[in-house]
Amino acid sequence: MSDVIYQAQPPLEFIQPAFNPLFLRVVQTVLPSWIQWQTAISHIEADNVEILADLYREFQEGKVRFLLAFRHPKTDDPFCLGYLLSQLVPKVAREQGITLQSPIHAHFIYDRGIPLWAGEYAGWVASRLGGTPIQRGKADWTGLRSARDLFANGRFPMAAAPEGATNGLSEIMSPLEPGIAQLGFWCAEDLQKAGRSERVLIVPVGLKYSYTAAPWSAIAQLLSELEAASGLPVNAGRKDNIASMELLYPRLLALAEHLLSLMEQFYTRFYHQKLADAQTVSEIKDRNEALALRLQALLNAALQISEQYFNLQAKGTLTDRCRRVEQAGWNYIFREDFKDIKKLSSVEVALGDRIAEEATARMWHMRLVESFVAVSGNYIKAKPSVERFAETTLILSQMIAKIKGDKSFQRPQLGKQKVKITIGQPLSISEHYSAYKESRAGAKQAVADFTNDLQQAMQSLIL
């Protein structure tokens, strides 16, 4: 099912966690084979797993509650985390002489919108695995209460991606959302009220993807397809030339500049948006810096199209603005007054459908921005690598697919990858709790400070 929705609907229902031990056992058994079969991942390794093994021992002894805060560059990340918990942690625990009760697992927080594009079965699976959904961009009190209860009282520790969404980049983090820190402080508060002495920890987890062999030929082929789709001459190069960074980088830059020009014309001509000043851009000698300036101006203009329609103020980061647009769009599509749609007249339903269609069209601009929130013009130049080159090319392919309305788009697999998971040192919520409970202002500052500490800790794990 696509997240492109043209009909007004009742509000999204909360998907209640319904953990099923037998279903988890089946999933954990088939997971290694499924990863090999369905993904490009050929190998997963992890550092500092003994930290997790020891934390699970303490958790099972009733000494700690903790949450795994993991990086989220790709949609494959949950499979990697599942492999870490079901395969690597038990293995290291045995080697360390640590006795753990099976299963080793984690409750997890997922975006309520996932079943809209992945299919209803995704919600069913997540529920049976002990996941709890959150609607992004709003105060989803039902979802927050569920996550809060699981953190303090759940059978397993928690897991969540504090970036809130994938950004497609292994070595660049999006700004963290404050919800993870807030959940940690709520857990500490609930434990104190219950007279319980467990420490509350947040454990940073880094995930980094790299290719087992540099897939330059596959990248060159994808570039040719993108050049053809965007109207550029397909510059495949001489057949006796081996694809390389030196040969492909000028093509990637030319493609990015061409796509930017097309989108600038699109927003200037049809949406009357003011973009980067041509003279200012022309004065920038570095093509990458000029590209970055133009890209940021374009993203801002695209978001304004959505914000103006939904009557939203343009404040905060691009990510913050995307979340507000997403929630505004959902409010236009999933409507409280459509709870009992059978009582509505055909005219009311038709008008609701028209609003849903327009909301979806306006959210399309936000989805384009969402793909580029972490992209800078210097990502490849700052550290030339096949991984950064491939990630940038894949983001451009996703952009073209969105423009073309390709509902069945799946990111191309350019080559086999290995995954490096790094467990960081736990950060203690309990040590900050006294500052949190002093006052409302103190609580707000404590959440902000802890989120900043977590951002730095997670960033250090992928560099």
Image (cartoon, helix red, strand yellow):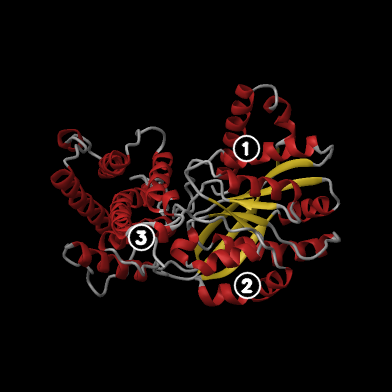
For the residue labelled by badge 3, is the local secondary structure a helix, a strand or a loop?
loop
How far apart marks 1 and 2 lie (CA) works out to 32 Å
1 vs 3, front mark: 3
3 vs 2, front mark: 3
How far apart marks 3 and 2 lie (CA) works out to 32 Å
Residue at 44%, 70% (x, y): give it.
415
Residue 323 horizontal/vertical position (percent) = 43, 44
The image quadrant where one finds the N terminus is bottom left
The numbered mark, 1 or 2, whose residue comes first in the sequence reads 2
Residue at 47%, 66% (x, y): give it.
118
**Residue type highlighted by circle 3:** Ile
Residue at 70%, 67% (x, y): give it.
20
Residue 5 horizontal/vertical position (percent) = 36, 60
For the residue labelled by badge 2, is the local secondary structure a helix, a strand or a loop?
helix
The numbered mark, 3 or 2, whose residue comes first in the sequence reads 3
Check whether the beta carbons of the residues at disc 1 and disc 2 lie within 8 A of each other.
Answer: no
| Mark linked to residue 106 | none
**Residue type highlighted by circle 1:** Gln
Residue 11 horizontal/vertical position (percent) = 47, 53
Residue identified by numbered label 1? 182
1 vs 2, front mark: 1
Q: Residues within 10 Å of mark 1 (few under 14, many from 20)?
A: many
| Mark linked to residue 5 | 3
Check whether the beta carbons of the residues at disc 3 and disc 2 lie within 8 A of each other.
Answer: no
The numbered mark, 1 or 3, whose residue comes first in the sequence reads 3
Seen from the viewer's position, the closer of residues 360 and 170 is 360
**Residue type highlighted by circle 2:** Leu
Residue identified by numbered label 2? 31
Q: Quadrant of residue 207?
A: bottom right
Q: Residues within 10 Å of mark 3 (few under 14, many from 20)?
A: many
